[in-house]
């Protein structure tokens, strides 16, 4: 039988319900992709999560945070694809109550300075540069009535 090394992260984790929306924070480590505790419903395979250390304003200890897709896309847009470049950047934590698998949880989004969290044309949360038109086609045809 073949085994893969299990990677675990030490330390406490961010609890979304305890984060005050509007709090400033900084990522203190590069993000690492690691197995999560969840399995894909269709395939049964382990899902992965992107985890980094975060330090919230007023705290003295870093905590682990699982970065959601909207946060990752916003950080890539603001600072580049290398998560090492995301470290030490001032971010604003924004929270939103959501349902995941029928359970109420608090999602935490990390928003770079000069960016905002909005919904795209399909209703998904995205983080974009302030003033960006979301979901507007680049070459929208003009329609005369």
Image: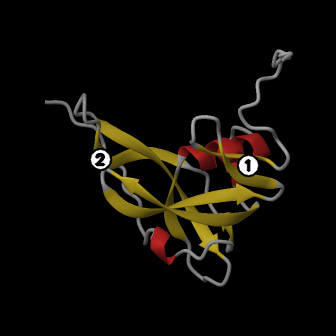
Left or right: where 124 falls relative to 90: left
The reply to whether dot 2 and dot 1 touch (C-beta < 8 Å) is no
Quarter of the image with the N terminus in it: top left
Element type at marker 1? helix
Q: Looking at the image, which is closer to me, 104 or 83?
A: 104
Q: Residue 85 carries which label?
A: 1
Q: Where is residue 113 in the image (x, y as percent from the top left)?
A: 81, 59
Can you give x and y, in whole percent of width and height, for residue 131 in the image? 85, 46
Residue at position x 44%, y 46% from top?
49
Vertical order, 34 against 63 (above or below): above
Q: In this view, does 122 lie to the left or right of 101?
A: right
Q: Which of marks 2 and 1 is in front?
A: 2
Q: Which residue lies furthest to the front in this view?
A: 145
User: Which residue has dot 2 on it?
Assistant: 38
- Rate crowding at label 1 as few (under 14), some (14 to 19) or many (20 or more) other CA atoms within 10 Å: some
Which quarter of the figure has residue 119?
Answer: top right
The residue positioned 56% from the left and 78% from the top of the image is 61
Residue located farthest toward the left when viewing the structure as drawn:
1
Q: Distance between the residues labelled 2 and 1?
A: 28 Å
Q: In which quarter of the image is the C terminus?
A: top right
Answer whether residue 14 is visible to the viewer in this image: no
As helix, strand or loop, the secondary structure at mark 2 comes to strand
> Residue visible at 63% across and 64% down?
94
Q: Which of 27 and 68 is in front in this view?
A: 68
Residue drawn at x 83%, y 50% as measured from the top left: 130
Q: Is residue 97 visible?
A: yes
């Amino acid at each position: 039988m073949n085994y893969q090394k299990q990677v675990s992260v030490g330390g406490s984790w961010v609890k979304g319900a305890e984060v005050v929306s509007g709090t400033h924070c900084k990522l203190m480590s590069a993000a690492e992709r690691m197995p999560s505790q969840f399995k894909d419903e269709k395939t049964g395979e382990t899902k992965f999560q992107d985890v980094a250390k975060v330090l919230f304003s007023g705290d003295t200890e870093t905590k682990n945070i699982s970065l959601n897709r909207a946060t990752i896309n916003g950080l890539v847009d603001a600072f580049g694809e290398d998560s090492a470049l995301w470290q030490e950047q001032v971010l604003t934590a924004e929270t939103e109550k959501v349902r995941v698998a029928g359970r109420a949880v608090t999602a935490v989004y990390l928003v770079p300075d000069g960016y905002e969290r909005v919904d795209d044309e399909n209703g998904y949360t995205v983080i974009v540069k302030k003033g960006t038109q979301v979901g507007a086609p680049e070459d929208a045809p003009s329609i005369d009535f």
